[in-house]
Image (spheres, rainbow, N blue to C red):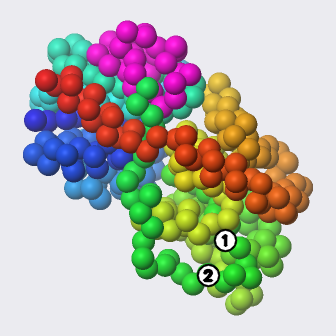
Amino acid sequence: MKILITGGHVTPAIAVIEEIQKRFPDWEIVFVGRKYAMVGEKEVSAEYRLISDLGIRFLSLTTGRSTPVRSLLKISFGLVQALWYVFKEKPAIIVSFGGYIAFPVVIAGWILGIPSLTHEQTRIAGGANLWIAKIAKKVCVSYADTVDMFPKEKTVCTGLPLRRDLFIVPKKPLFTLSARYPLVYIAGGATGSESINKYIFSMLPELLTKYTLVHQTGYSSYSNARGKSRLLSKDQSSRYHIFPYISVSDLSWIYHCAKLYIGRSGGNTVGELAALGKVAILIPLPWSIGGEQEKNAQWLVEAGSAIILPQRDLPDQLLKKIDEVLSRFTIYHQHAQAFAKTIPRNGALRMCSEIQHLLS
């Protein structure tokens, strides 16, 4: 059995891949995605690194978004390339995780008579997934209130696929923690956030007088972060832990030990924070489509486990907001822990069941 997986939301895709590998070890998985996040870049994308690390064959696709005209030409090229991949691989099913990268692959499968299943990660249906849903055999969503955005007769709420290892705390610590300096985890999504990093770099001396920091910078800001670390005192630099990307086992330990998360509010991030019962200061991506990250963040605010800090207020408000949240940490933490009990952890397993059902 060969499964072709594609799409822009790589973290839930990996959760499903790991579940498939556990339940159906004889199934062959092929992934179609972007080898480079941006045209002309030499640094390979996070998805290429992650999928390759799983030992899965990665097929690089070049395509574009719906605009401008130049992108329309890339879409045509992407469709031809996708048709070739699907024709050559002959998968039994295509499993999509949305985004513009998945669109030509699912279309190619439809043309060649190969069924597809798609998953919507976020609380707002993505434009590509709204189109994909028209021809997909099954649509899976993370949240019950998203079901109405898709054809009801073929849409099911499976929950967000979460990686199993997030809930298994490694026995070996990543580094030694000091009770005097609470651990704060700062991140900007899988690729990091240069906008957030810029402000964090300017505040490092103040932050490190009170806290131990884990800073997931992304690859583009990593060398800059190392340079900033060298300018700190020996004591401060010993409590500033920087990573371009954090593996799931290390992330599990960080989530377990961190008192506070500060960063973006992408669909996967808020899902993990909710399931693990973490307190957060969320900085939504200002230009996310349809205010998606703002709505994701609001979900945790309503649960009582987080506050929103607009990016424009970061320089003036971050230190103050950290103090405010930690001064009321017990209340936020109680809300976070109670909310965590309502979050399903078996989204990947349920998606595997839907895939198996379509194949039977």
Q: Which residue is mark 1?
A: 183
Q: Amino acid at mark 2?
A: Leu
Q: Amino acid at mark 1?
A: Leu
* Marker disc for residue 177: 2
Where residue 5 sits, quadrant-wise, is top left
Where residue 179 sits, quadrant-wise, is bottom right
Mark 1: few, some, or many residues within 10 Å (few <14, many ≥20)?
many
Q: Which residues are magenta?
A: 129-156
Find out whether residue 22 is within the magenta segment: no
99 left or right of 310? left
Find out whether residue 155 is within the magenta segment: yes
Q: Who's the residue at 36% across and 46% down the image?
A: 15
**Which residue is nearer to you in this view: 36 or 323?**
323
Q: Is the residue under label 2 in contact with that under label 1 (CB below 8 Å)?
A: yes
Determine whether the residue tagged by mark 2 lies in a helix, strand or loop.
loop
Residue 85, horizontal then vertical, whole percent: 19, 31
Quadrant containing the N terminus is: top left
